[in-house]
Image: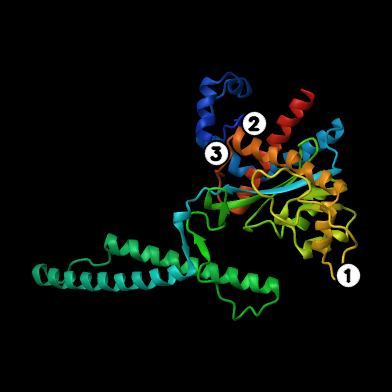
Amino acid sequence: YHPVMLTKVLVYGYCVGVFSSRRIQRRLLEDIPFRVLAAGNEPDFRTIADFRKTHLTALQGFFEQVLQMARELGAARVGRVALDGSKVKANASKHKAMSYQRMGEKQRQLRDEVTQLLAQAEAADAADDAEYGADRRGDELPAELQRRESRLTRIRAAKRALEARAKDEAAATGKPVESAKPDANAQYNFTDPESRIMKGPDGFVQAYNVQVAVDEQQLIVGQAVTQETNDKKQLIPMITIIAAQSGITPTQLLADAGYCSDANLAAIADTTIDPYISTRKQKHGERPGRPGPCPRGPLPKTATRVDRMSRKLHTKAGAAVYAARKAIVEPVIGQIKQARGFRQFLLRGIEKVQGEWSLVCTTHNILKLYRLYG
């Protein structure tokens, strides 16, 4: 099948909330727009799925191309940008995850079970030899023993992965690498090892943390996927990503309290960006704006950067700017997750998930441009 045809079908599917390759195949049989785009061709779900996996890198390039088209149309104005993160479920169950401590316990249990099964096998062999003679083949492992040996091998590999992760984290923070050990509660998922347990609106889920930077036209001008469970470390990387993907650095950046830290405020102070970053979590149902009357008098000399940002958002002008954040970025997350139904990745692994998220964001921008200029 021609790659252009498959690309059209895939992009249109993501635009209308049809993400599964099997559902796309079904639409190619019964949905007129799909049939027109496919020119009557009927690729099966495996062809569609393989095409998506094989050409993810090329499909990611669409995001920048669509943004370039938006700039040429005058739609993408990266002046005021709002930043937000959201948890999207991985294609893996949290019940397939195991903590480092539990791995040690399970490893010991499996070793004991393997020892017992080997003893039982030897006893059975001895009984068979006594009954049938000593020329019986004995090189096949019993199925029960094979299962335990396989699980033991996977747990050993998972422990090594967690230990390597602990050493990498120690190296990144300047701590001694040799003595670094995983936390007892560090989790490893056997289905998608690169996903993480994260806290979402519905409790803890196996997920990835997706990031979007959105302009006032609700066009996504920067997007990324991270394994970090919160947004604290995403502010400066996202500023770099916005510049790389849209070609422009924003003049104003609005972000919620998840991005607020003294280190982040210090780093953004070295840029030309005017930040409006909440210093406290907004209560459910609370109207955006000033959290209370602006304190009078000058800030004390001991005031931290967080204190200064808090005072900035207490002013009438600062509160008015920050209040726009909800109307800029949060509807975009809602449109993707609620209106289009994208709540779980189909692919596994951070690289493939990044490609899929890029496709989701690209199709969001296509839909937005269609509504603006179509």
Name the front one of labels 2 and 3. Answer: 2
Would you call the spot at circle 1 few (<14 residues within 10 Å), some (14-19), or many (20 or more)?
few
Q: Using the rendered view, name the quadrant where residue 19 is placed.
A: top right
Q: Earlier in the sequence, mark 3 or mark 1?
A: 3
Q: Position of residue 109 (x, y in %)?
A: 34, 71
Colour treatment of the image: rainbow
Q: Position of residue 198 (x, y in %)?
A: 57, 55
Q: Secondary structure at mark 3?
A: helix
Residue at the image position 71 percent from the left and 30 percent from the top: 367
Task: State left or right for residue 2 relative to residue 183.
Answer: right
Q: CA distance from mark 3 to mark 1?
A: 60 Å
The answer to whether residue 3 of the structure is visible from this angle is yes
Depth check: 66 or 118 in front?
Answer: 66
Task: State left or right for residue 158 relative to residue 248.
Answer: left
Question: Any mark on residue 15, and which?
Answer: 2
| Quadrant location of the C terminus in the rendered image | top right
Q: CA distance from mark 2 to mark 3?
A: 17 Å
Would you call the spot at circle 2 few (<14 residues within 10 Å), some (14-19), or many (20 or more)?
many
Task: State left or right for residue 100 relative to residue 342.
Answer: left
Q: Secondary structure at mark 1?
A: loop
Check if mark 3's residue and mark 1's residue have beta carbons within 8 Å.
Answer: no
Q: Amino acid at mark 3?
A: Ala
| Quadrant location of the N terminus in the rendered image | top right
Q: Using the rendered view, name the quadrant where residue 37 is placed.
A: top right
Q: Earlier in the sequence, mark 2 or mark 1?
A: 2
Q: Position of residue 208 (x, y in %)?
A: 60, 52
Q: CA distance from mark 2 to mark 1?
A: 53 Å
